[in-house]
């Protein structure tokens, strides 16, 4: 029998970390070696009872023993891990689900992809990755005459906005228009923003309750409106996708991969 894929979970004590640990415990061919988290709190540590290290700076040996490190923590924690364990990660795989990454984390990840297989995804669901491909196609066919607005909703504890997935969908629409998102992005509207300029891609974030994650991309024309939407009903959906990515990434050559590669969406 093939050796199981050995995983280290970064953010092991969080909602996603614990959901992933539970899923791994139910599956064959994959095991969690240990977790990393700023809190080693036994009550919150991965539910399968794995040890949790609180300092990524001390995790070199652990990372070298793993095939894949899966991170669902926070940008600051990921940055510490990347700064401290760049050498240990060489020849291994890193799957990042943490959202709200800044230029520092992006640059560290880009550097790491020369020596390790890296994959960053704002959303691991098959449905959202398919939605992204559909949004790009819709934007290409409809063109900028149809105004694009992205509306997302998440639970009240989410700290970044707009969501990483909303930005990814906006990027897909921008690609369809043949432009860069940065030049067209408009976050919310308030006061007297004036008339909507052509080509703008708007983002609106709703926060509240326990909403797992909803994304709606609207193409508003003069006589019709097309809407493409995805509603996540259970966060295990993201954990399943992340685990699928982790299995696929184990043993891959260094480089930057995407969920489209994992799912064969081209
Ligand atoms: P959470 O707050 O429940 O867990 C985060 C964990 O990281 C906690 O255990 C916390 O102790 C740890 N941590 C370490 N340093 C931290 C810091 N500086 N600030 C905050 N937490 C820190 O969050 P979650 O719902 O598990 O989400 C974790 C990350 O994954 C978020 O960025 C979230 O947006 C993202 N996420 C991504 C997907 C996806 O499909 N890519 C899906 C869900 C959540």
Image: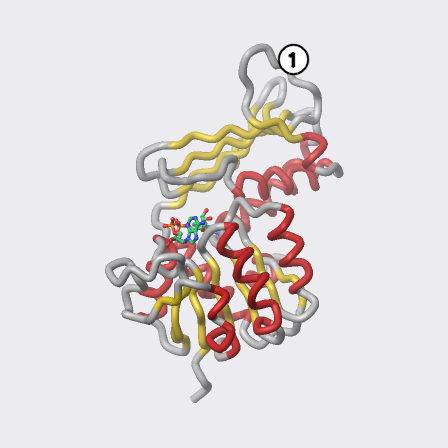
**Residue 123 in view here:** no
Looking at the image, is 128 positioned above or below residue 250? Answer: above
- For label 1, the SS is loop
Residue 137: quadrant of the picture: top right
Name the quarter where the C terminus is drawn: bottom right
Q: How is the image coloured?
A: secondary structure
- Residue at the image point whose x is 24% and y is 60% from the top: 43
Q: Residue 241: give x, y in percent of width and height.
A: 46, 59
Q: Tell which residue pokes out farthest to the left in this image.
A: 43
Q: Tell which residue pokes out farthest to the right in this image.
A: 178
Q: Residue 80: give x, y in percent of width and height.
A: 53, 58
- Residue at the image point whose x is 62% and y is 27% from the top: 186
User: Mark 1 sits on what residue?
Assistant: 195
Name the quarter where the N terminus is drawn: bottom left
Q: Is residue 52 left or right of residue 192?
A: left
Looking at the image, is 164 positioned above or below residue 193? Answer: below
- Residue at the image point whose x is 36% and y is 69% from the top: 24
**Residue 39 in view here:** yes
- Residue at the image point whose x is 53% and y is 62% from the top: 81
Are there few (<14), some (14-19), or many (20+) residues within 10 Å of tag 1?
few
Q: Residue 130: give x, y in percent of width and height.
A: 54, 50
């Amino acid at each position: 029998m093939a050796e199981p894929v050995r995983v280290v979970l970064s953010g092991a004590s969080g909602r996603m970390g614990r959901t992933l640990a539970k899923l791994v415990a139910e599956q064959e061919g994959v095991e969690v070696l240990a977790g990393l988290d700023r809190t080693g709190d036994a009550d919150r540590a991965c539910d399968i009872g794995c040890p949790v290290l609180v300092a990524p700076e001390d995790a070199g040996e652990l990372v070298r023993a793993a095939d894949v490190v899966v991170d669902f923590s926070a940008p600051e924690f990921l940055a510490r891990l990347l700064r401290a364990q760049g050498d240990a990660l060489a020849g291994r795989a890193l799957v990042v689900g943490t959202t709200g990454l800044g230029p520092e984390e992006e640059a560290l990840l880009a550097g790491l992809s020369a020596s390790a297989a890296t994959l960053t995804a704002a959303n691991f669901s098959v449905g959202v990755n398919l939605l992204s491909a559909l949004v790009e196609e819709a934007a290409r066919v409809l063109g900028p005459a149809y105004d694009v607005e992205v509306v997302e909703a998440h639970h009240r504890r989410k700290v970044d906005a707009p969501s990483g997935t909303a930005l990814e969908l906006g990027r897909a629409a921008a690609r369809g228009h043949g432009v860069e998102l940065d030049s067209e992005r408009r976050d919310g509207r308030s006061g007297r923003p004036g008339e909507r300029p052509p080509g703008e891609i708007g983002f609106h974030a709703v926060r509240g309750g326990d909403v797992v994650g909803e994304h709606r991309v609207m193409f508003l024309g003069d006589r019709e409106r097309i809407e493409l939407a995805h509603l996540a009903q259970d966060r295990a959906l993201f954990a399943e996708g992340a685990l699928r990515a982790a299995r696929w990434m184990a043993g891959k050559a260094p480089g930057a991969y995407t969920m489209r590669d994992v799912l064969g969406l081209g």
